[in-house]
Amino acid sequence: MERIEKTRLNGRTLSIGAAAASALAAAGVALGQEANPPTAEQAMAALRDSCVDLDTVWVLVTAFLVFWMQAGFALVETGLTRAKNCVNICMKNLLDFCFATVAFWAVGFGLMFGTGNRWFGTSGFFLSGDPAETFRSLAWTPVNLDAKFIFQLVFAGTAATIVSGAMAERTRFVCYLFYSAVISLVIYPVAGHWIWGGGLLSPGNLFGEGAGMFDFAGSTVVHSVGGWLALCGAVVVGPRLGKYGPDGRVHAIPGHSFPLMILGVFILWLGWFGFNPGSTMMATGQSLAIAHIAVTTNMAAAAGTGGALLTSRIWFGQWDASMAGNGCLAGLVAITASCAFVGTSSAALIGLVAGVLVVVSVVFFDRVVRIDDPVGAVSVHLVNGAWGTLALGLFSNPVYGATGPLKGLFFGGGLGQLKMQAVGVGLVGAWCLITGFALFGALRAVSGLRVSQEEELRGLDLGEHGMEAWPDFQLVKA
């Protein structure tokens, strides 16, 4: 693949192609049909407007794809849990985005991208202020503030919804709404500011001029943050009734619908083509980069599926369908940090390792440390978010990002970028563990994080919502 020239700002990498020249020529032909030919300034203004229009449409369409991932998460979680809790899980995935919308608009977006210090933004709350000055960390994309906000909002919603699956089937509904709002209000935005908002881990700060941690579309910013918080929540709320017997045995609690789970995986896979390619946040001059990101994203997903499937066959003697689905998601999570900076063969290897890791991790958390995670959210998002972030330091290739991260270890770059990636993983992990345990511990102490034993046995659908997802139908006389 020929070299792609790129410009890097705040951990994102953008290619600059020849599209502007062709667009200028087209604009000139169109404008030249008028009676009075336009000036050069007028022609350039028309060109800029048309490019911004195209960029805005691209950002919005990819934002809508990422929003649709909420449906994917709902189906994966519903399929991997019991029928008596389906309404509860669907309601959580619906409402966490609603709460995230308000919280991120009011405070989170300003904390994450507003002008401030290395630790958090101190301006731009309620989308206020001069966009050019207040949100300088997003100045590299030409789209307007509304488009920037809606694209970043759907990422915030994704981070919040990851926690739902790990705490499914035993968490009080009102507590879930509260902590999902806090995640979008404070915890996620602060971590995001460090990497994407010009903060501590961005190039030019902690690691010196031109050096920094890179996370193109959010293996750490989105997925590891959600995964760390899922781990905290699962530990504090405790395992489901009957998961671990008094004799020390681990009891499997199968989900009720594999078709729902695998449909959710397909929806998430589709949504990731907005998640990763959309993180260019512009379309003009980006065709090579967007296409390459789509290819690496897809390759990692396929390799992750194969890796998990083969690992489960060797380990359990079965072609485990749920592991295959989570392997696909693990590959997608892992490639998210480096999708713009690595080659296709590297993406395949990153995904393959992710598929193996997710199986090992699920068994480790389930049987060794005995943390009950019904959907494997910690293994998919935390473990493979960290792996994907570190993998950038191993496989980064300057052919795909001339002014992006340093060369990876396997491409002659030494340990420099890998060390910065590791520092970023550690700092974000520490932030999430401290805030996560504080948040869930406070909820447990103040209002009770967990439903009653009777309600858990009966199912949260009836206990919290007064309805069932799959009611029995009976004919009765009037």
Image (cartoon, rainbow, N blue to C red):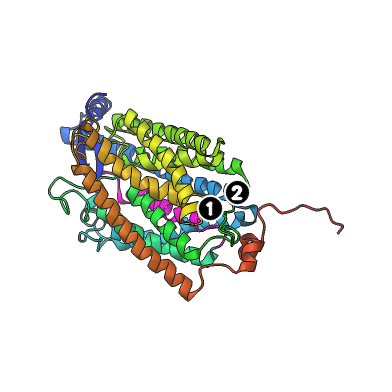
Mark 1 or 2, nearer chain start: 2
Q: How many numbered markers are drawn?
A: 2
Q: Residue at x 39, y 59 (%)?
A: 184
Point out the stretch of residues depicted in magenta.
Answer: 141-170
- Decide if residue 65 is in sight here: no
Disc marking residue 58: none
Q: Residues within 10 Å of mark 2 (few under 14, many from 20)?
A: some
Decide if residue 58 is on the left or right side of residue 252. Answer: left
**Label 2 residue SS:** loop
Q: Which residue is mark 1?
A: 374
Measured as percent of width and height from the top left, residue 154 is found at: 41, 50
Instruction: Tell whether 301 sits left or right of 13.
Output: right
User: Residue at point 57% right, 55% down?
Assistant: 249
Query: Which residue is at the front of the view, 316 or 376?
Result: 316
**Residue under the point 23% across and 51% down:** 137
Residue type for callout 2: Gly
Residue 182 left/right relative to 200: right
Task: Please identify the residue farthest to the left as the structure is shown.
Answer: 209
- Residue placed most toward the observer, 384 or 1: 384
Q: Within 10 angstroms of label 1, few (less than 14), some, or many (20 or more) residues?
A: many
Tell me the chief SS of the magenta region.
Answer: helix
Task: State the image coordinates of residue 144 (x, y, percent, origin top left).
Answer: 30, 48
* Of 326 and 100, the residue lying toward us: 326
Q: Are marks 1 and 2 in contact (CB under 8 Å)?
A: yes
Q: Quadrant of residue 428?
A: bottom left
Q: Secondary structure at mark 1?
A: loop
**How far apart in space, not on screen, are marks 1 and 2 (Cα)?**
8 Å
Which quadrant of the figure contains the N terminus? top left
Residue 217 horizontal/vertical position (percent) = 33, 44
Q: 322 and 94: which one is in front?
A: 322
Q: Residue beneath label 2, please?
A: 255
